[in-house]
Amino acid sequence: MYVRFPLSLRNVEDLLHERGIDICHETVRFWWHRFGPLFASEIRKRRIEGMRSSHWRWHLDEVFVKINGERHYLWRAVDHEGEVLESFVTKTRDKKAALKFLKKAMKKHGPAEVLVTDQLRSYGAALREIGAAARQETGRWLNNRGENSHQPFRRRERAMLRFRRMQSLQKFASVHASVYNHFNLERSLTSRAHFKKNRAVALAEWRRLCTA
């Protein structure tokens, strides 16, 4: 519940208390730190086995995140269907950071045919260095997919009252992306009947994963 929904640790504590489970909110924190990465790893493994990553069009975008009053940047790569491919945290958003982010995403998923970015010069400089400048596309509304991909994370960030360490941000962003991918059913693009069927399948697989 803590990773799937925009809930605080104390929200989860109260919900479990209503179900007769009396725990401290710090126990919820321990549980997600202990089991969240395991669930996320299993989700990624099953999705890789069941489908190949899209190499057609990627949307790249970055958003700032405050950690103890200091600005950091969360980079995100999503495909044309909204699947979050990579989340990466850096202290800067210069060429070096963009290059590190691109290399990590391409090492895991392979190169994309088209890379849609905003006007940040760091993208162009990094893509020129790896020989992919011709595949870059920029435009006023072309990267809405990448920009909108930050919204679920922003809702979680507000519920969590932000982060205290860079490592915690990287860990949670990766876990949250995997869980979001699992339940991202493109509700607005399918019929109600098809959506309900896909939701039931996703929930059944999630329950098997949590009880394994």
Image (cartoon, rainbow, N blue to C red):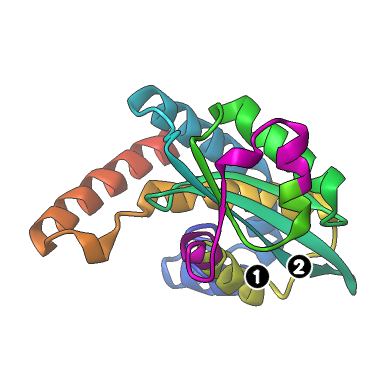
Give how far apart the Cα atoms at labels 2 and 1 are: 9 Å
Name which of mark 2 and mark 1 comes first in the sequence.
Answer: 2
Q: Is residue 68 left or right of residue 135?
A: right
**Cβ atoms at labels 2 and 1 below 8 Å apart:** yes
Q: Quadrant of residue 133?
A: top right
Residue nearer the viewer, 75 or 13 = 75
> Does residue 155 show up?
yes
User: Residue 6: x percent and y percent?
Assistant: 52, 70
Task: Classify 101 as above or below 81.
Answer: above
> Label 1: few (<14), some or many (≥20) within 10 Å?
many
> Does residue 31 show up?
no
Q: Does the segment drawn in magenta span residue 208?
A: no
Q: Residue at x 12, y 63 (%)?
A: 192
User: Residue 142: x percent and y percent?
Assistant: 48, 63
Q: Indicate the secondary structure of the residue bearing disc 2.
A: strand
Image quadrant containing the C terminus: top left
Q: Residue at x 66, y 42 (%)?
A: 34
Q: Is residue 75 left or right of residue 69?
A: left
**Span highlighted in magenta in the image:** 125-148
Q: Residue at x 54, y 29 (%)?
A: 109
Residue 65 numbered tag:
2
Three-letter amino acid code at the position of disc 1: Glu
User: Residue 61: x percent and y percent?
Assistant: 63, 58
Residue nearer the viewer, 124 or 160 = 124
Number of numbered discs overlaid on the protein picture: 2
Task: Classify 29 as above or below 39.
Answer: below
Task: Classify 203 as above or below 48.
Answer: below
Residue holding disc 1 = 157
Q: Indicate the secondary structure of the residue bearing disc 1.
A: helix
**Which mark lies nearer to you, 2 or 1?**
2
